[in-house]
Amino acid sequence: MPPGPSRSRGAGLAFAAPQPRDFAMSRAARLCLVTDIHHGKPSFSKAGPAALGLMEEFRRFVDETRPDLVLDLGDRISDEARESDLVLEREVAEAFAPIAVPRVHLDGNHDRDYLEVADNDAILGRTAHHETIDVGDWRLVVWRADAKLHRPSGFALQDADLAWLAATIAAADRPLAIISHVPVSGHSQVGNFWFENNARFSTYPTAERVRAVLRTAQVPVVWISGHVHWNTLTMVDGIAHITLQSLTETFTTAGEPAGAFALLELSDEVLWRVHGRDTFAWTARAETLSRRWLAPLPDFRELAGSKMHQAAEAAA
């Protein structure tokens, strides 16, 4: 097993601009991930009562895999009310407790409906803030952006969260694996049980600001999120945006809980494999994730020399 991960926390650090470099890598990292556990009562297509049993399967997977880190991407419970949510969160924390591997816990919107970040901190024995963790030859970026769902407007991207991410990307001297609860790719929600008709709640309304920051990265980048309850891979500007299926979701698995959890292996290759009833796998050479794409063309009607522009001028 490679040397243990080293952490860097908080904001207010001075970052130097990165220089392009050859990312020859010799130390691999292995991460086990689970998300959207949704322990609690049944809720639409979420099989909440199955959560703790499925967590036993996840613990066995971790024991067999022997990863460097375990990552929980948030939404540990299906919220009900403050007092019952505290009980549910404690029960999920107890399900994680036997895992001897270092753990990173994000909060999702359901962890924040009736609870504060401090409540989750106390239960999980952590102090939540943005942080980076060097693992193998990669850097894990733990982006704990505001995950509270404000009704009716949705998620709110805070300037301080974006500024920390921008500084971290500017300082990157190795490949980055970024995790968040809420995805930022802007991928289609067509076919999604929860979000096809509620796409505005599937991401930050101003997620394009995050993608603009990501476009400046001069290193390989992969971004992994939960929240949307399905497995997806979306390439934007040469960056892989992945979402992981919920542990207890049933809409893609014929009414049975997906039992989904994943293994991420990071070296000069990126290998992603989702286990359970809703399997998914993907691999890529890390170097390909550092190639930024050409900026998209403007509206054809505004593109000088195009036939659409000529037609628009003629019709004016």
Image: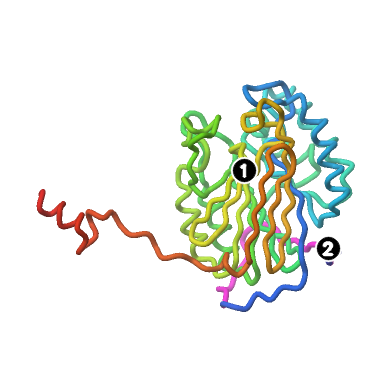
What secondary structure is marked by label 1? loop
How was this image coloured? rainbow
Secondary structure, mark 2, is: loop
Residue 52 has which mark? Answer: none
Task: Tell me residue 77's x, y (percent).
Answer: 71, 30
- Asked which quadrant contains residue 306, the reply is bottom left
Left or right? Give the position of 316 relative to 258.
left
- Looking at the image, is 36 positioned above or below residue 66? above
Q: Is residue 16 magenta?
A: yes
| Image coordinates for residue 46, horizontal then vertical, percent | 67, 27
Over which residues does the magenta segment extend?
Answer: 3-19
Q: Amino acid at mark 1?
A: Asn
Instruction: Pick the residue in front: 17 or 313.
Output: 313
User: In this rendering, would 77 be left or right of 305?
Assistant: right
**Amino acid type indicated by mark 2:** Gly
Point out the frontmost of discs 2 and 1. Answer: 1
Residue position for label 2: 4
Q: Is residue 86 or residue 88 the one in the foreground? A: 88
